[in-house]
Image (tube, coloured by chain):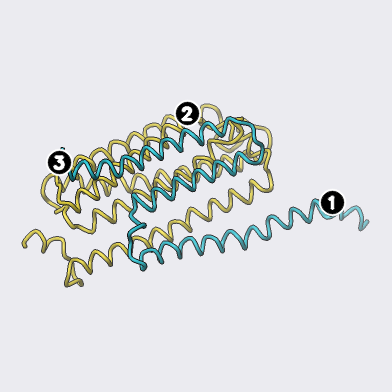
Chain colours: A cyan, B yellow
Amino acid sequence: MSAQTYAIWRKNGLVWLALLVLLGLTFGAAHIPLGGLNVVIGLAIAGIKVALVVVIFMGLGHSPSLIRLAAAAGVFWLTILFVLTLTDVVTSRQFQNAHPQTKGGEQSLSRNR
Amino acid sequence: MIARAKVLQPPWKELSRQREGATFGIWIFLASELLFFGSLLLLYTAYRVANPDVFITAGRETDLWYGTVNTAVLMTSSLTMAVAAQAAEADMRHLTIWCLGATVVLGLMFLVFKGFEYAEDIEKNLLPGANFALKEPATQIFFALYWIMTGIHAIHLSIGLGLVGRLAVFGALRGVQLRENPQVEVTALYWHLVDVIWIILYPLIYLMGRS
């Protein structure tokens, strides 16, 4: 194996090993009862794995700023999509919990009757 | 110079500019793909917020082992794809072709496992409809999203297989020059995105309700 081949395998192989370790971690953590924290840990580990793939395998770490801007634009619009939609989803649910009488159509109908 | 002329396409006058343009273009495409899958993830999030317990009950019915093995397979294919792309830059033709081939084999492996998993899901009546296995109505919403998200992911992976396979075959037959060819990087970036999407889907589909 030439020095160059070794260097390529070493650099990417280490990322791959890290990805497999993280997969093992997330698999194990999912079996520990932590309630709502389980999904947080699952998504956090997924986030680290995505960062490894994007920064090293996809080379965003040493990409020109134009490329980083294109990638950031995707995340930016995705964030807007999530924040604005979930603003409605989450708050209307809280509103329902705080004021149960507005929950179902039946109840409000019976009140009007 | 003859081989280089094949890689350089109009309207570009310089290969370096063409490569910049190709990379920029695919990243814009990948950003739009992120929004495409993002809208499905948003739908998932909204329904999960509304039905937190039922989603966990439904998620427990997915096959954790197929999901985990397939995650490992796909991450390994990302390794071979990254090595192929970097080997192509370094003009290591054999390594490039072998790694492109390995990527195709791993991608096919993923689809075969997914096929077995789908067969098992159908057998367990997890296809939304009249004979659905679970009682709570919202479990059908989870499985509708499961089929749509994994199905669209599989379609993306199949397209990737075609692109990677094309480079492997034509590269080996010397029909395509692999060195400095923007097609290699563009294909690699697309392949990695398909992996990224799966990495995000994995905890949302397979890791729920296991504790």
| Foreground label between 1 and 2 | 2
Q: Is residue B199 placed above or below B8 in the rendered structure?
A: above
| Foreground label between 3 and 1 | 3
Q: Residues within 10 Å of mark 1 (few under 14, many from 20)?
A: few
Marks 3 and 1, how far apart at CA: 70 Å
Q: Residues within 10 Å of mark 2 (few under 14, many from 20)?
A: few
Check disc 2 and give the amino acid type.
Trp
Give the x, y percent position of residue B123: 51, 27
Give the x, y percent position of residue B186: 29, 56
Check disc 3 and give the amino acid type.
Ser
Number of marks in the rendered image = 3
* Rendered image quadrant of residue B51: top right
Do residues under tags 3 and 1 come within 8 Å of each other at their CB atoms?
A: no
Left-right relation of B141 to B197: right
Callout 3 and callout 1 share a chain: yes
Marks 1 and 2, how far apart at CA: 41 Å
Q: Residue at x 40, y 35 (%)?
A: B72
Callout 1 and callout 2 share a chain: no
Which disc number belongs to residue B65? 2
Do residues under tags 3 and 2 come within 8 Å of each other at their CB atoms?
A: no
* Rendered image quadrant of residue B98: top left
- Image quarter (top left, top right, bottom left or bottom right) of the N terminus of chain A: top left
| Residue at disc 1, secondary structure | helix
Residue toward you, B27 or B166:
B27
- The residue wearing badge 3 is A2
Residue toward you, A67 or B13:
A67
Callout 3 and callout 2 share a chain: no
Tell me the subunit letter for badge 3: A
Marks 3 and 1, the one that precedes in the sequence: 3
Which disc number belongs to residue A100? 1
Tell me the subunit letter for badge 1: A
Give the x, y percent position of residue B3: 9, 58
